Image: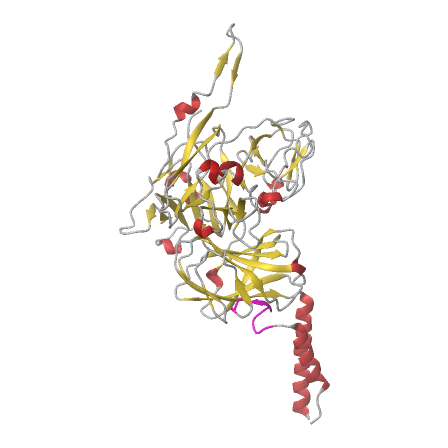
Amino acid sequence: MNITRFSLAAVFASSVLLTGANGQTTATTDPVGFVTVGITAGTGTTKKNTLFSVPLMETEEITGQVAGTITGVTANTISNSNAGWTPGELSQPATPYLLQITSGAAEGRLFLVSSSAGTGGAVAGAANTDTTVTVSSLDAAQVNLTTLGIVAGTDTYKIYACDTLSSFFGTPETTGIIGGSSTSSADTVAVVLNGAVQTYWYNTAATPNRWSRVGPGSPDSSNVALVPNYGVQYGRIGSSALSFVVTGQVPTISREVEIKNSGTTLLSSFWPVDSTLSQLGLQALPGWVAAATAAASDTVVLTSGGTASTYWYNGTNWRRVGPGSPISDTTVINLGTAIQVGKKGTTAGYTALNQAVPYDL
Amino acid sequence: MKKSPLLFLALTLALASHLNASSGVDLVNFGSSSFSVDAGSTAVYTQDLLGITMNTTPALGDTWYNSSMTKLVDDWSGFTGFEITMSVTGTNPNLPFSFTLYDTSFSSINEYQANTATAGLTLTGVPLAVSLPGNGNLADVQYVQFTWGGGGSAVNVTTTGLAGVPEPSTYALLGLAGLALAGYAVRRRRA
């Protein structure tokens, strides 16, 4: 797989410890860096799939407090009475934002802020006011914010920018993706939104050319958000590999992400370091089905070089579906990749997966 | 022979309730005579007069949707839920899928999810659970879309149509029809 290894040392080179001339004043900045994520080449006529994710957080300048203390929470809103945001600035369809809870019981929760309109496939909802943001209906369908133990007046948040299909992948002219009049001749990008898969391609039959969704009317999808908690399946038909450089802030707190109880979740690896199947912690998720065979168990799918491999946990070890069912606890989850989590059964709802920061800061 | 008013009432009510042999009201049949699959679809399928059959290992996102369809009921807003009529031949690998209803302006009305687990060897109504409410109009459904959620296992599945689960008032109508039929039977026995 065409993944350039990420060096934490390089990241922390950007973490500056500032000491004043008198040696009394000390300030730190958040560690930042870059990673390169790669897309496996197709054959020119047949696609190869790569599961990948965007592993860094994008800092952003906005009017008002980027970070602050939460002063109110409802089922789908978060308020900061001192925020001073410009109404609507966080709710523009083409430039979505994320709000992360940075302390307290809900530390590491990441929410997409709803857009004021559904233009280009954005998730429409209420626009932000000077003090309140509304989280997207996708997030609100997963969890009621009032159940997360967020303490008003104590817990804190931070706002980040969020990529879209258009901002991340650009156009064939600038990034080498293959567009086409239909998906049969174009690269495709699939995301899983609350268990439902949506597939997109760069549609050269539309005027002007644009990202479109595979479905009735092939609607404009340029503003579909790529949320860092979740992954993307890139189907590459072009015969050359692609790579994308991602810059941003290194996560410094734990993350908590919802896994669908029945169906598919495309989970991002999230952290800018490699991990292993065991370290993901999925086997400890409440309700995770472990059994002697993959057919009876919840499963995980990884891709490498365009080839998908399926794994299951038998109660003792992770094993790969294949001859000999080899133990795979230490199978590497490369940074910048994604994991297709398949949960069997019909249980409704979601279960939170909590992952601690896998490196020392 | 003198027609019984009870029999007439029972037949009328049964017809009015518009119920099919399963548990819901037929809304769309996926057979080729009334449902055209759009060429933009990416799932491998075959279609005949009965419905749409997929005998493959579906990949994440494999999908089919219509370019036109004949609706058997125009306004779907009176239904409290929906079922997709489905059968699975051979091993049922319990694969997840989603089903979305769109209006004439391609706005998502509701997105539903289910899996093949509850589909039987014979055609079964598989309940669809709302996973994400949209902002479209159920009285104006024009398109439907079926999308596989992956799963990595082969499945041989046939989907023949979509049915609506009636409001309780419709069930009451059916119950009334049943009572009328029972009454008619009793009267015939006494005559």
The verdict on residue B28 being magenta is yes
Q: Residue furthest right?
A: B5
Image x and y of residue B157, in percent: 45, 64
Q: Quadrant of the N terminus of chain A?
A: top left
What percent of the width, then of the height, locates residue A73?
65, 37
Residue B93, quarter of the rendered image: bottom left
Residue B97 x, y percent position in the rendering: 49, 56
Q: Is residue A166 above or below residue A47?
A: above
Q: Quadrant of the C terminus of chain A?
A: top left
State whether the magenta stretch is mostly helix, strand or loop: loop
Residue lying farthest to the left in this orientation: A324
In this rendering, the answer to whether B185 lies above or below A44 is: below
The region drawn magenta spans B20-32
> Residue A244 in the image: x percent, y percent?
44, 34
> Residue B44 lies in what quarter of the image?
bottom left
Task: Report the colour scheme.
Answer: secondary structure
Is there any visible trace of residue A286 in the rendered image? no
The answer to if A313 sits in the magenta stretch is: no
Residue in the foreground of this view, choosing between A190 and A143: A190
Left or right of B51: which side holds B190? Answer: right
Q: Is residue B42 visible?
A: yes
Residue depicted at x 34% and y 42%: A329
Front residue of A39 and B39 = B39
Q: Is residue B11 positioned above or below A290 on the image?
A: below
Residue in the image at 48% along x and 16% along y: A17
Residue most toward the top?
Answer: A22
Looking at the rendered structure, the number of numbered marks drawn on it comes to: 0
